[in-house]
Image: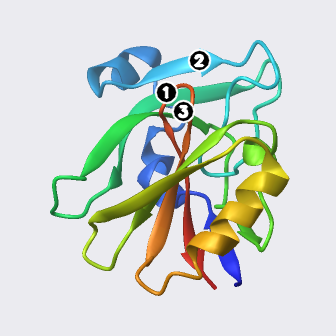
Amino acid sequence: MTFTVSGLEIEEFRPLFGLSDDALRARGVIRRRADAKPGFPCRVTLEDAEPGETLLLLNHESHKAPTPYRSSYAIFVRERADAPARYVDEIPPVMEKRPIALRIFDRDGMLIGADLGRHGAETKAKIEAIFENPNAAYIHAHNAMHGCFAAAITRS
């Protein structure tokens, strides 16, 4: 089964880039500087930021469905991000070596299952198996440890 892992659209975040720390703070956003790699996963580029690079730490509503499973949580976005990443039938670098929780949703935005991939190859195999179920409309990947949204996964 062919699938696509997509980074978040940049337009939501672009107005925040370059704002002062005070202006960001007034919006509930914090500028951070990466001090390690891995450790600062960008949700647009689906890559870890390089040490010294600046990112925005902000709350993002990742699941906007009008259901009990509506969800928002903290994410990182690199200030130099310019376009969302798209990976077809492969796992992006940011998800390769992290345990990833896979939340499976139907067309109505209701959770119908979940799984866990401990590394890239296992995560890919689990995604392919999930999409064998015709009721699985899309998957939201989350970092299993911290719980933050990682990426949306759709059938290609």
Where does the image place residue 20, in percent across and percent down from the top left?
46, 21
Which residue is depicted at the point 67% across and 77% down? 3
Q: Work out whether mark 3 precedes mark 1 in sequence or the reverse, and give the earlier one.
A: 3
Where does the image place residue 91, in percent across and percent down from the top left?
77, 58
Residue density around tag 1, few if under 14, some if 14–19, many if 20 or more, within 10 Å: some
Residue density around tag 2, few if under 14, some if 14–19, many if 20 or more, within 10 Å: some
Residue 4, above or below 121:
below
Where does the image place residue 21, in percent across and percent down from the top left?
45, 16
Q: Which residue is mark 1?
A: 57
Disc 2 marks which amino acid? Arg
Quadrant where the N terminus sits is bottom right
**Side (left or right) of 139 relative to 33:** left
Q: Which residue is mark 2?
A: 32
Q: Which mark is residue 18?
A: 3
The alpha-carbon separation of the residues under discs 2 and 1 comes to 7 Å
- Residue 85 visible? The answer is no
| Residue nearer the viewer, 8 or 97 | 97
Q: Nearer the viewer, mark 2 or mark 3?
A: 2
Q: Work out whether mark 2 precedes mark 3 in sequence or the reverse, and give the earlier one.
A: 3
Which residue is depicted at the point 24% across and 53% down? 69
The alpha-carbon separation of the residues under discs 2 and 3 comes to 13 Å
